[in-house]
Image (cartoon, grey):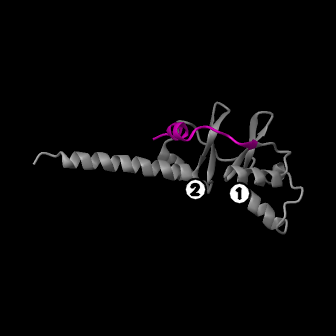
């Protein structure tokens, strides 16, 4: 299975914010949309990613308040990315090794979507369920 198949099922809906936006507004958007990350776009191009990890770090540094912190001050500027042709096992390995829970999917400089660790877990589970059903069907119809 490849990343493009996960995106096809998930859809490529992107919620973004500008680097000049307030981190507090980003948190409101993330909560409202039930997201763990936002793509940071500057003039239509990906400038970085803001995840709950960066927000929590900023809260810890700010004594529990974000104040007027800008997204640009806390976002991850050079996130690990995937391509649509990345194989699922390579994606899992990349996420585990980098510690990234959200990976932007980029092709030819164009942002196609974001894959989360949850999306990967769901895809693995569905793939295993399908293989399990196929094997059970094969065994059931095995000539005696």
Q: Secondary structure at mark 1?
A: helix
Front position among marks 1 and 2: 1
The answer to whether residue 137 is magenta is: no
Spatial CA distance of label 1 from label 2 is: 19 Å
Q: Can residue 75 be seen at all in this image of the molecule?
A: no
Label disc, if present, on residue 52 of the rendered structure: 1
Span highlighted in magenta in the image: 1-16
Quadrant where the N terminus sits is: top left
Crowd class of label 2 (few under 14; some 14 to 19; many from 20; radius 10 Å): few
Q: Residue at x 71, y 42 (%)?
A: 15
Residue count near mark 1 (Cα–Cα under 10 Å), binned few <14, some 14–19, many ≥20: some
Q: How far across and how far down the image is residue 139, in percent?
A: 21, 49
**Residue at figure coordinates x 77%, y 33% from the top left:** 44
Residue of label 2: 97
Specify which label sits upstream in the sequence, 1 or 2: 1
Q: Residue at x 57, y 53 (%)?
A: 117
- Residue 28 seen in this snapshot: yes
Let me know if residue 2 is in the magenta part. yes
Residue 122: % across, % down: 49, 50
Element under label 2? helix
Q: Is residue 126 left or right of residue 97?
A: left
């Amino acid at each position: 299975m490849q990343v493009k198949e996960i995106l096809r099922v998930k859809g490529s809906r992107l919620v973004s914010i500008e680097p000049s936006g307030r981190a507090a507004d980003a948190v409101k958007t993330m909560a409202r949309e039930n997201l763990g990350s936002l793509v940071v776009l500057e003039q239509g191009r990906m400038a970085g990613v803001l995840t709950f990890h960066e927000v929590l770090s900023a809260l810890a540094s700010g004594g529990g308040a974000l104040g007027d912190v800008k997204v640009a001050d806390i976002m991850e500027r050079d996130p690990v990315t995937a391509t649509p042709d990345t194989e699922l096992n390579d994606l899992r390995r990349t996420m585990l090794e980098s510690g990234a829970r959200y990976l932007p999917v980029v092709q030819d400089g164009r942002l196609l979507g974001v894959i989360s660790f949850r999306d990967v877990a769901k895809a693995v589970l569905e793939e295993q369920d399908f293989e399990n059903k196929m094997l059970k069907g094969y065994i059931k119809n095995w000539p005696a």
